[in-house]
Image (cartoon, helix red, strand yellow):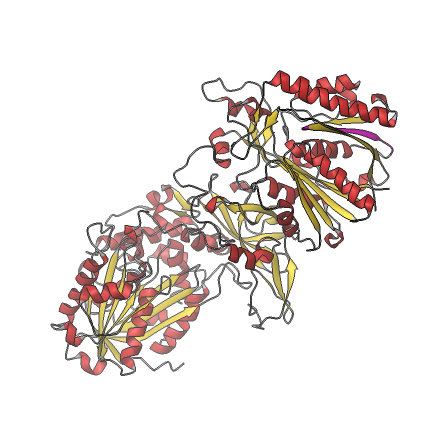
Amino acid sequence: MIGIRSYGAYIPRMRLQLAAIAGGGRKAGSGGGERAVAYYDEDSVTMAVAAATNCLEGIDRSQIDGLLFASTSYEYKEKQAAALIAKALDLDRNTITADFADSIRAGTTALRSALDAVTAGSANNVLVVASDCRLAPPRSAQERSFGDGAAAFLVSAEDVRASIDAAHFVTDEIIDVWRTERDPWVKSWEDRFVVEHGYLRTAREACLGLFKKTDKKAADFRRAVLYGPDARSHTALARALGFDVKTEVQPPLFGQLGNAGAAFAPLLLIAALEQARPGDSILLGNYGDGAEAFALSVHDGISSLFGNRGVRWHLERRAELDDYAKYLNFRHLQTTSADPRGGTGVSATVHYRERDQDISFHGHKCRRCAQEQFPFQRVCFSCFARDDFDAVRLSDRHGKLLAFTFDHFAPSPDLPLIVTTTEIDGGARAYLQMTDANVSEVKLDLPVEFTFRKIHEYGGTPNYFWKCTPLR
Amino acid sequence: MNPEAIRDKVAIVGMGCCKFGENWDKSPADMIVEAAYEAYADAGIEDPQRQIEAVFCGAIYPSKGTAEVADALKLYGRPVSMVTNYCATGTDAFRFGVFSVACGMYDTVLVVGFDKPKDRGVSGPNVQTAGVRGLPQTPAGWFSLCAARYFETYGAGREDLARIAVKNHHNGTLAPKSMLKKEITVEEVLAAPIISWPFGLYDCCAQSDGAAVAVITRTDLAKSFRDDYVLVKAVAIALGPNPQADPSFDFLRWKPTIYAAEQAYAQAGIANPAKELDIVQVHDCFTLTELLTYEDLGLCEKGSAKEHIKSGTFALDGELPVNTDGGLKTFGHPTGATGVRMLYENYKQLQGKADKRQVKNPTLALSHNLGGAPQTCGIAIIGMP
């Protein structure tokens, strides 16, 4: 049996209040609700690293031999995200990596490819990470319905908690939702056409095809997990397939998370698995330039994953963002006096030399005196031994604040910037920014964990390093 | 190290200092000439092209600093060298000058500290983005990192820092060459906008332009220049580990100051600095730097600074006046000039020429710089023969 061995979600802590979006001459408060928005230091890569880290909780990372990344919103057009994510996760250099891009259906397509790889025996433990941070035109309907997030699954033949028993695919050429290389944000055709001839027609076709292939009907599924572009269309599809929306359909989280693109259906699947019991059957339907439908069975041991950080945990961990201008700055949607993407950026050769430290967050442990230190040293800080170190991964440890300041003059769109010296369990110290924290909770010896973030974007490309965040 | 290698072997016989400030209408050359010709006049040097045998410069902003100095002063045919050592740059230039005279290579040399940061179009130091791990960072962010731990350990707070700013602003009103001449109150300091907690606006020194110059010579030649020359007792530089990575850093003291003080006190033969020193200029780039430096230099016990601040130990009329001219707080901090500017104040004080801010009969004076993350400290001790 081959299927999902583990899962992990990531939803950014910031929740943009939908009432705050209105502005622009319109009266604020056209309904409550919120959507998840990536913080200024987050993007589809950092969210993918976080979701994957949550998925790998308690799992030896040396077992991972494949990583598939699915997204429509990765920063580079040429340069693989999966390789960067594998480096941040400190995976083996022989890991098979690939990006699945350009369609919001990419998350489940990658999941299917992982299954195929494990089934074929070309890999044993394949990590699938879907992540999206899609930009919508400011003050558009999409801006209200989109959400940012990431979902990760470990596909394996071992310890399978949910198997994928059948799948049905439909490919479809339609101009409904698109973004070219030169478009700053997602565009779409008139919504009734997009919903009726795109989403409803094609997603229904995929699900009914699966029903036919497996000789099943809606009543045979305990839960339907369906992608939807908005709450109304989502309900329409569920009804068309014969599901009772109140009791049988996984709530699509509009007004809480929002449509997380390539990560949306995967996130909803995690939400369903978090409440599943062994023996449950789940229908997973996804859409984008075609549609895909999967029949899943939940197995013994599913509850062993309930401690992983999934959708529920992230929905509870939230901070309200009611300053729309701040959101626009997070996404570079308005000009500021200092160009956060100006300048020459980082040196590729320095990045190359430091990537074990900066991306994998390795420190040194002295073989003579056992003192751990960061960054890498040639001569030990404590016993002065030369070149006698082992590299140790620091990213999945905890730490505590030794010192901090609130810098009101740092180039950050959300001042003050919290800057710390953090002691990492084991004794190494690092000068780190703190993120996803309120000034009021910062105190000496505060326990922290580490999170992979964009440090800056000088030169127009994202530059990543680790930050600390209060241990949640 | 031979602690007695330089003690009393080198004398300062002339000093000059331009007015520090936002010198929009002055070039580096203007400031260098102003300070150097004041120093020449002070030393009675009438033919610098003949009498000055070497020049040691300190500045961190220019890339062509030696040529700037040689061209400004027309000191051609002479060795002109430039040193940078973070905020200890001026003190380090002085150190090389002293060594060059003490070893007998030259009789009389010029030490020039200068910097012109106000031509860059920004009001503070550059926000630096260095390397791929390089965080956007500001000096206020670095120097504030000791605050939370020190406050918690010793019960100090922002009011104690504010009193340091108030003291230095007062002293600065009495110094003709200071940039800021404005009395402030503790309330104003506490109400000012926060730059990097716990530092508000008045806890931070400003950027300014400036130049300061010393003429130094062999002690046996000093009398030929003047009777009230001042002797070099010690000049030390020490580096410490980056406090952001040092696994044994305790956030209660700056190690470079402790290392440099140990060297300097050995050179000067000082056993009890609090008793033996008469005046001290410390690197008050931020108020907390001055507070920690009181303790790190051994001017008071570790943790006791706030009591001494309250009781006025370090005020102009206190037992051990610190930053008698108002310090970096009122002069600003043209990095290369600062250490030499501090020597200028100590020199004038020792000669009894400090006018309204004159301390009574000082005979031994220390100046201190601390720079980097911080990682480097420079200390100079001068005194009467």
Magenta stretch, main secondary structure, is strand
User: Relative to residue A65, is residue B119 drawn left or right?
Assistant: left
Residue situated furthest front in the rendering? A173
A303 is higher (above) or lower (below) than A362? above
In x, y percent, where is residue B223? Answer: 16, 79
One can see residue B345 in this view: no
User: Relative to residue B20, is residue B306 drawn left or right?
Assistant: right
In x, y percent, where is residue B246? Answer: 53, 63
User: Relative to residue A296, is residue B218 drawn left or right?
Assistant: left
One can see residue A58 in this view: yes
Residue at image x 23%, y 76%? B11
Residue situated furthest left in the rendering? B46
Which corner quadrant holds the N terminus of chain A? top right
In x, y percent, where is residue A409? Answer: 41, 45
Residue range in magenta is A279-289
A50 is higher (above) or lower (below) than B341? above
Please identify the quarter of the rendering in which residue B229 is found: bottom left
